[in-house]
Amino acid sequence: MTSTIEAPRSPYSRSTKKSGVNWEKWGWIYMRVSGVVLVVLIFGHLFVNLWVGEGVSALNFAFVAGKLTDPFWMVWDILMLWLALIHGGNGMRTLVNDYATSRISRGILKIAILVSVVALIVLGTLVVFTFDPCPAGAPADLVASFCKSL
Amino acid sequence: MSNATIDQKPVVPEEIKSFTVTLIIRRFNPEVDDEPHWQDFDVQLYPTDRVLDALHKIKWEQDGSLTFRRSCAHGVCGSDAMRINGRNRLACKTLMKDLDVTKPIYVEAIKGLPLEKDLIVDMEPFFASFKEVQPFLMNSVTPVKGKERIQTVAQRARFDDTTKCILCAACTSSCPVFWTDGQYFGPAAIVNAHRFIFDSRDENAAVRLDILNDKEGVWRCRTTFNCTEACPRGIQVTQAIAEVKQAIMRGKA
């Protein structure tokens, strides 16, 4: 009797065709660049939300609403949203490439990642640009102070 | 002549004590077993003995069927890379005194390559990716008769680190990307490409950079430093891979 142990790695099939754009290279560069930018964005976000002024106790609907009407914080948040989700999605994609051995499971997992990343980006972008800081009929003590002047 | 007698005792070197070490080895015999299994052996060893000596003692005195590769036994041929206590090491360079002998020592074959028997794996996929980076000098100019290809000390120093590779596969088989992805070149192939990419006498750096710019080339490297930690020759493997990435981005060596 002779038994062989299954080869540990996916079968070798390196493609010989060269497409114009090397996505793997640009993906790698994107991870490095967005990583550095995200360190600044995320720690800045945490610093302003949790540390400055009253600290974490200042966090409420009015605080967030106030931030989302300031163009500076809108740009900050939208950058953080897009960079972080694409960064995370690309990271998940590389994990799938590493550990999903069959073509089908790889495809399913990557499509699932793509769908969730796109859905979250669309939802987040909608929130940032269509957010109403002064919903009609809301009690005055819960919304931002500038709502009174409207 | 003085008749001074030797009243001092001859200096007896302090006796070095031996101790019993338990080795737990992952065995697999394709003719008998369906699955690899762990088997333990007790061996009497000195602190100056190496893991390779322990394996020899087992093979010669206890179980002749234990199978492993070794050739020079002095850390040059690169035959006996194996996973010792979960780390890729050369058995011939790992001394007992550097291991915790109060606990059993786990020895198994390197990961990521097809297991053939006991500690022996099929190295062919490893050498296939090594061959793919064209690890030989390519130069179209014939040097003047009787002369060598001249290189400055600085030019030689540029790739000195990566000339040390002995192709033992310790780095490549410690790489988590290589463990599962049959397409990735692995650290050793990139190290050997680096050795020629940065050699001033070589003319085909661009060809090798193009090969490694593949979807499954250097970009799969996750910078986990497993390879640098595993290298028995102390090559800064991750740094070499990073230098190749830089060269690809700049488009030149």
Image (cartoon, rainbow, N blue to C red):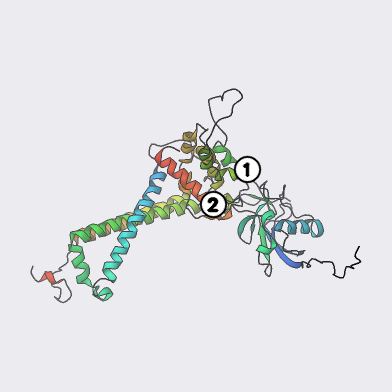
Q: Quadrant of residue B10?
A: bottom right
Image quadrant in which you'd find residue B88: bottom right
Instruction: For mark 1, give the secondary structure.
Output: helix
Q: Residues within 10 Å of mark 2 (few under 14, many from 20)?
A: many
- Badge number at residue B124: 1
Indicate the quadrant containing the C terminus of chain B: top left, top right, bottom left or bottom right.
Answer: top left
Ranked by sequence position, the earlier of labels 1 and 2 is 1
How far from the left and from the top, in percent, is residue A55? 27, 74
Name the residue located 66 percent from the left edge and 64 percent from the top edge.
Answer: B99
For the residue marked with disc 2, what is the amino acid?
Thr
* Chain of residue at mark 2: B
Residue at the farthest front position: B1
Residue B165 x, y percent position in the rendering: 60, 45
Q: Residue furthest left?
A: A149
Quarter that holds the N terminus of chain B: bottom right
Give the secondary structure at mark 2: helix
Residue B3: horizontal and vertical position, in percent?
92, 66
Whole-number angstrom distance, CA of label 1 to CA of label 2: 16 Å
Q: Name the residue nearer the viewer: B149 or B206.
A: B149
Q: Residue at x 61, y 42 (%)?
A: B127
Mark 1 vs 2: CB contact within 8 A: no
- Residue drawn at (81%, 59%) of the image: B61
Q: Residue A123: horizontal and vertical position, in percent?
A: 27, 59
The answer to which of A103 and B116 lies nearer the viewer is: B116
The answer to whether B27 appears left or right of B236 in the picture is right
Examine the image and state in which quarter residue A17 appears.
top left
Q: Amino acid at mark 1?
A: Glu
Q: Which residue is mark 2?
A: B180
